[in-house]
Image (cartoon, rainbow, N blue to C red):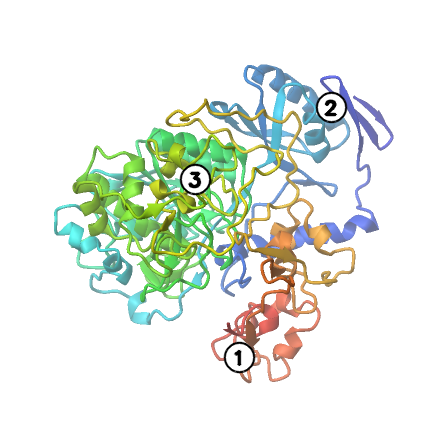
Amino acid sequence: MKLFGSTLLLCLSGVCITVIADDTDKPSNKNTKNLRRRNAVEENHVTAHLFAQENHSTPPHLAMEGMTTPKRTQGVVSRRVIIKYKSGHKANLMDTLVVAERNIRTAGLPDMRVNLDLEELDSLVVTAEPALVEALQHSPEVEYIEEDPIRFPLSSSINDHASSKEHRLLQESIPYGVNLVQAPEVWARGFTGEGVKVCVIDSGIDRTHPDFVRSKLSGASANIDWGEDGCGHGTHVAGTIAGERSNGQGVVGVAPDAEIFTVRVFRDNCAFAYGSEIYNAARTCKANNANIVSMSLGGPSQSNAERQAFDDLYDAGVLLIAAAGNGGNQRRSYPASYSSVMSVAAVDNNKNHASFSQRNTQVDIAAPGVGILSTFPIDGCQICPRNSNGYGAIDGTSMATPHVSGVAALLWQAIPDASASRLREALQNSAQDLGTPGRDTLYGKGLVQAVSALDYLEGPPPPPNTNCRNFPSDWFDSDGSDYTCEWYAQGTNCISFGDGYENGGYTANEACCACGGGTDDNNAPPATPPPVSTPPPVTPPPTTRAPISPSPTTSSPTTSSPTTAPPSAAPVDNNDDPSASCIDINGWHDIDGPEYDCNFYAIGLNCYFHGDSFMNEGETANTACCVCGGGTLVDNNDGGGSPTAPPICTDVPDWHDSDGAEYDCDFYADDNNCSEYGAEFSNFGYTANEACCTCGGGNIQE
C-alpha cells in the first residue's frame, strides 16, 4: 500500500488498484446531493418500509429514532457484503483482511469489520469501503462476493376499520382468521400445538403480555432483549400463532399451546435487518430445536448464500414459512420465493385476494391477512394504534404467515413423525382452491385448511389423476434436459425444487402432473405454449442442487462457481408474467434533475433508499422505473407491444388537508410535497398519501 496525496495504491494478494481517498472534511459540490439523499434515508425511509413496499405511506405517529444506516466517513458509504471463500482458504482470507484493514486506515477510509462468520457456508459477512470490496473480488481466496440483501417486516398498514371495542378486549375472542383456517375443529380432535416449538424471527415479543404463557416463551437476540418489543410487529405475529386459550381475555391463537421461540432481528424502530442476520437467526432456531421457522419479513433481492442456508435447513427437517410480500405486484420477495421456503399470500375475511399481496408463481398458499386482530405490547409500540391496550388489527402478508405456521404446529403435534416435506405437501395439497381452478399466482394452492390437512396426513395418499398429462410434454427445467417431469416425480423433488428453475414460462409445479401441474385431457392447453429452451448462463450461477434422488439418466450436472464478484448493483427483474415486459416511464427523472433518472436508480441500493422520495410529475422511482418495481408492463402477445391499460385513479372528492382548502391534491402534485408532507396533516380521515392519486392514494378503478 502506498499513499500519494489523495491517491491510495491498495494491493491485496498481488492485485493492485487505485483508490481516490477523500482527504477533505467537506464533500465536493458534486457529492453534496448524494449526501443529502443518504441523510434523507436516515430520517424518512427505513421505518416507512414496514408499512408498504409500493404504497409509500408512513403513519404520522411513528417516531424516527435510532435508525440503522450504512456507516459513513467523509461521504464514503461502506458496503455490507457476503464473501464466499474457497474451501480451505479461510485462514488466508483472514490474513488478507488484516492487511487490508491496516492499509485503509492510513488513507482515512472507513474501518472494515467482520459482522458474521458463517463457517457452515464457507462465508464471511463483511462491512467495508467499496474499493476494498473491489480489490477482494480479485483475491485468489475468494470464490465470489455478493451484497448482503436487506429485509423488512411485511406489515402493510394499521387497519382502522377495526372498532375501538376490538382494541379494548375484555372477554376472550377468536379472531376470524383462526376460524377461517379451521383451527377450532382441530382443537376438538385434541390437537392444540402442545409440544411443538415455532420459531418467530421478528422484532421480539412482549413477554409480560397476559395472552402468552410465560413458561412457553423463550428466545435469543444479539445485544437486544428478545422479551421486549418496542416495534410491536413480533408480538402481533406471535399472538396469531399462540395467543392463550381459556384465560378469559384477549385473543386465541391458531395453536394456543405451542411453544414460541423468538429470535429478535428488528429493533424498536422497526427498521431493516440484513439477509445474513435472518438466516443466521434461522440457524439459531434449529439449534434450539424449533420445528417451524415463521418469517413475516422479506425484501426484493436474493442471495446465493441465503438460498443455500435455507436449502440446508429444509433438508435438515425444518419447515420454513415466509410472507409473500406487500407490493401488490408480480415481483418476488425473499426469502419467501426460495424453493425451500413456503410463500404465503393474504386474503380477507371473504377469502378474496388482498390487493397488497404479491401475486407470482412462487406463492404456495394463502391465509387471512386483512384486519387481523392480535396482541400488541401492553405499553404501546411503533405500530400500535393509539390507546390499543395490548390489542389491535393490522394488514399484511406478515399477518397471513403466522396462520400457516400455527396450522403446521397443530399438524406436527398430531403426526409427530411427519417430515417437513410431508407436512408442506399436506398443507398445500389440502388447501381450499380459490380463484382460477388449480394452482395460481394469487392464492398458490389455495386457503390453508387445518382439518383438511390433518385428514390428508392421516388418510391414504390421494389417487393419481389419470387424466393428467405433462404440459409442455417435453418440458425440462432451466438446468437442462436431465431435469424432466420424470426426475421431479422422484422422492420430494417437487417440494424441494418445484417452484424454481423455471423454463419456457413454466416451473415443475406448473408443468408436471407429479407436482400438481400439467393439464387434464378435458382442459385445453394454451393456444401457443412458450418455447422450451435452456437459457444462456448467467453470473452468478444458481446455487447447485444436491438431488434428493439421482437423475434417471445421468448424475446431477454442476455449474462452476464464478471467480469474480457477481453483478449486484441492480435489483433482479422479478416480474413474474412471462407474456409481459416492463418499460420505464418515458423520460422520467426525479425532482432533482435529469441525471437522477432510472439509470441512476439502477445503481447500488438507490431504489431501496430513495425510490419512494423525490417525486416528479406524480411519480417516484418506485412507480416510474422497472428496476425499482415500477414502470409499465407491455403485453408481448398482442402483436403491437402496446402497454397494458393502467388502472384509473380518482382523488378523494373535495379533500384538502387540515391546514385549509388551498392544500388540496393539486398542491401535493407540486414539487416534493407528497414526500415531505404526504403522511401528515390528516383531514376527513385521510392524509394526502391516502387521498391523492399523485401521492399514491386515491380510489383505484381497474
Check disc 2 and report its element: helix, strand or loop.
Answer: helix
Q: Residue at x 64, y 17 (%)?
A: 95
Question: Residue 147 sits in which quadrant?
Answer: top right
Q: Which residue is mark 3?
A: 339
Q: Which residue is mark 2?
A: 103
Disc 1, SS: loop
Dividing the picture into quarters, in which one does residue 92 lie?
top right
Give the amino acid type for the residue marked by disc 2 in the picture.
Asn
- Residue identified by numbered label 1: 652
Residue shown at the point (42%, 46%) measured from the top left: 471
From the viewer's side, name the closer residue of 470 and 692: 470
Whether residue 390 is visible to the viewer of this picture, yes or no, is no
Res 672 → quadrant: bottom right
Pick whichever of labels 1 and 2 is earlier in the sequence. Answer: 2
Dot in front, 3 or 2: 3
User: Residue flagged by tag 1: what amino acid is it?
Assistant: Val
Residue 633 at x, y percent in the picture? 60, 60
Instruction: Name the amino acid, label 3.
Output: Ser
- Tag on residue 319? none
For label 1, the crowd category at 10 Å Cα-Cα, with few meaning under 14, some 14 to 19 and many 20 or more, is some
Pair 1/3: label in front: 3
Q: Residue at point 40% right, 69% down?
A: 160
Left or right of 570, for residue 437: left
Residue 628 locus on image (x, y percent): 62, 53
Q: Spatial distance from mark 3 to mark 2, Cα to Cα?
A: 42 Å
In the image, is residue 188 above or below residue 617? above
Could you tell whether 3 is left or right of 580 in the image?
Answer: right
Label located before the other in sequence (3 or 2): 2
Q: Nearer the viewer, mark 1 or mark 2?
A: 1
Q: Residue at x 37, y 33 (%)?
A: 314
Residue in the foreground of this view, choosing between 332 and 90 = 332
Residue 49 in picture, x, y percent from top left = 53, 55
